């Protein structure tokens, strides 16, 4: 693998478990709001939104419904993201849809 410089040093990985993951209306609403958040955040520089691949290995957790990863230039930008209107709107619209959220934040070495 060639060495690449990562300029967005703070990664924010979020896993969501929906209350009703088989309900297509719920999924569509969640997907729409998540994509809107990634597209409209003024602090997130990269966004990835997806579902479990279904890789069958003992160390892989495929129990979540959705994954969202966003990166920031700094912890300060992440902190601003936490209170920006786009993020607060996403939480307000979607918090009734999930049963669990797990977050992993990391900083580049």
Image: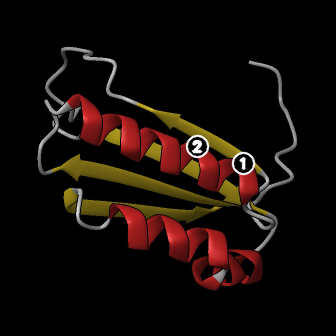
How crowded pointer 1 is (Cα within 10 Å; few <14, some 14-19, many 20+) is rated as: some
Question: Residue sitting at 58 percent across and 79 percent down?
Answer: 82
Question: Is residue 37 among the parts visible in the rendering?
Answer: yes
Question: Residue sitting at 76 percent across and 76 percent down?
Answer: 77
**Quadrant of the rendering where the C terminus is positioned:** bottom right
- Gap between marks 2 and 1 measured at Cα: 6 Å
Question: Residue sitting at 21 percent across and 49 percent down?
Answer: 17
**Quadrant of the rendering where the N terminus is positioned:** top right
- Which of the pair 78/92 is nearer the observer? 92
Q: Do the residues under discs 2 and 1 have CB atoms within 8 angstroms? A: yes
Report the disc number at residue 107: none
Residue 63 place in picture, x, y as percent? 16, 37
Instruction: Kindly state the secondary structure of the residue where label 1 is placed.
Output: helix
Eyeballing the image, is 51 above or below 34? above
Residue 105 place in picture, x, y as percent? 50, 65
Q: Quadrant of residue 67?
A: top left
User: Furthest residue to the front?
Assistant: 25
Q: Is residue 3 left or right of residue 64?
A: right
Report the disc number at residue 39: 1
How crowded pointer 2 is (Cα within 10 Å; few <14, some 14-19, many 20+) is rated as: some
Where does label 2 land, which residue? 35
Eyeballing the image, is 99 above or below 38? below
Count of picture labels? 2
Residue 86 place in picture, x, y as percent? 64, 69
Question: Residue sitting at 22 percent across and 57 percent down?
Answer: 98
Instruction: Kindly state the secondary structure of the residue where label 2 is placed.
Output: helix
Question: Is residue 109 among the parts visible in the rendering?
Answer: no
Q: Quadrant of residue 37?
A: bottom right
- Which of the pair 58/102 is nearer the observer? 102
Q: Quadrant of residue 58?
A: top left
Q: Is residue 103 left or right of residue 44?
A: left
């Amino acid at each position: 693998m060639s060495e690449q410089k990562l300029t967005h040093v703070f990664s924010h990985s979020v896993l969501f478990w929906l209350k009703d993951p088989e309900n297509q209306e719920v999924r569509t609403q969640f997907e729409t709001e998540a994509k809107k958040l990634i597209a409209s955040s003024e602090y997130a520089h990269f966004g990835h939104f997806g579902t479990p691949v279904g890789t069958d290995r003992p160390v892989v957790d495929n129990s979540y419904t959705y994954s969202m990863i966003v990166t920031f230039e700094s912890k300060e930008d992440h902190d601003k993201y936490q209170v920006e209107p786009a993020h607060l709107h996403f939480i307000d619209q979607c918090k009734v849809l999930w049963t669990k959220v797990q977050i992993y934040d990391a900083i580049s070495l």
